[in-house]
Image (cartoon, rainbow, N blue to C red):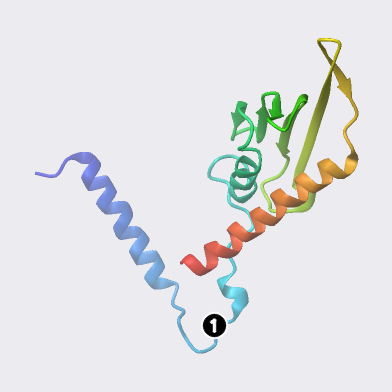
């Protein structure tokens, strides 16, 4: 005897197959525009391409917070082994559900060791812009690969 959960799963799968079959397609007039993955994927509250690309980009540092519903990723302080007297902390904000450049903002804090204490230091604007560009490029690549993987 089927369990209620199995029955529900079968109904959902059957409905999905029916809906997909009704969509048609596959003809000679398919255009590349028809195969572009949607730019708005929001099953987690924010654009999933930006979310995944952001997590991947800041994965070198330990995470303090990762809130997919609010679109905020905060790292802990991180120092490279090559430069232990300098550390950075990043916050990534995903501001929209669409995959757009203005839907992403990165904030960086930098500190340097002086006299046994950590002292705030400036972060070059180009550093933040470069991080944003890396995330956006990865997100676009994820979107592009979603088209070719399906």
Q: Is residue 33 above or below residue 10?
A: below
Q: Is residue 76 above or below residue 132?
A: above
Number of marks in the rendered image? 1
Quadrant position of the N terminus in the picture: top left
Which of the two residues, 79 or 3, is positioned nearer the viewer here?
79
Badge 1 is on which residue? 30
Q: Is residue 141 above or below residue 88?
A: below
The image quadrant that residue 71 belongs to is top right
Which of the two residues, 83 or 42, is positioned nearer the viewer here?
83
Name the residue at the bottom extreme.
Answer: 28
The image quadrant that residue 29 belongs to is bottom right
What is the crowding at mark 1: few (fewer than 14 residues within 10 Å), some, or many (at least 20)?
few
- Name the spot of residue 44 as percent of width and height, x first: 55, 40
- Name the spot of residue 5 as percent of width and height, x first: 24, 40
Which of the two residues, 77 or 105, is positioned nearer the viewer here?
77
Q: Is residue 148 above or below residue 65?
A: below
Q: Is residue 16 shown to the viewer in this render?
A: yes
- Name the spot of residue 101 as percent of width and height, x first: 78, 52
Secondary element type, mark 1: loop
| Residue 146 left/right relative to 123 | left
| Residue 22 left/right relative to 131 | left
The image quadrant that residue 106 belongs to is top right
Question: Which residue: 61% across, 51% down?
Answer: 49
Question: Which residue: 67% across, 28% down?
Answer: 75
């Amino acid at each position: 005897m089927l369990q209620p959960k199995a029955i529900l799963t079968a109904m959902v799968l059957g409905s999905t197959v029916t809906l997909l079959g009704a969509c048609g397609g596959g003809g000679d007039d398919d255009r590349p525009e028809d195969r572009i993955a949607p730019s708005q994927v929001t099953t987690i509250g924010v654009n999933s391409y930006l979310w995944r690309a952001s997590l991947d980009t800041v994965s070198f540092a330990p995470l303090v917070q990762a809130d997919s519903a609010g679109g905020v990723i905060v790292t802990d302080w991180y120092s490279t082994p090559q430069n232990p007297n300098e550390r950075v902390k990043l916050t990534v904000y995903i501001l929209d559900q669409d995959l757009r450049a203005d839907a992403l903002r990165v904030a960086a804090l930098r500190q340097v060791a002086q006299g046994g204490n950590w002292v705030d230091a400036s972060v070059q604007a180009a550093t933040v812009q470069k991080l944003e560009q890396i995330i956006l490029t990865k997100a676009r690549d994820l979107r592009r690969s979603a088209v070719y993987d399906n």
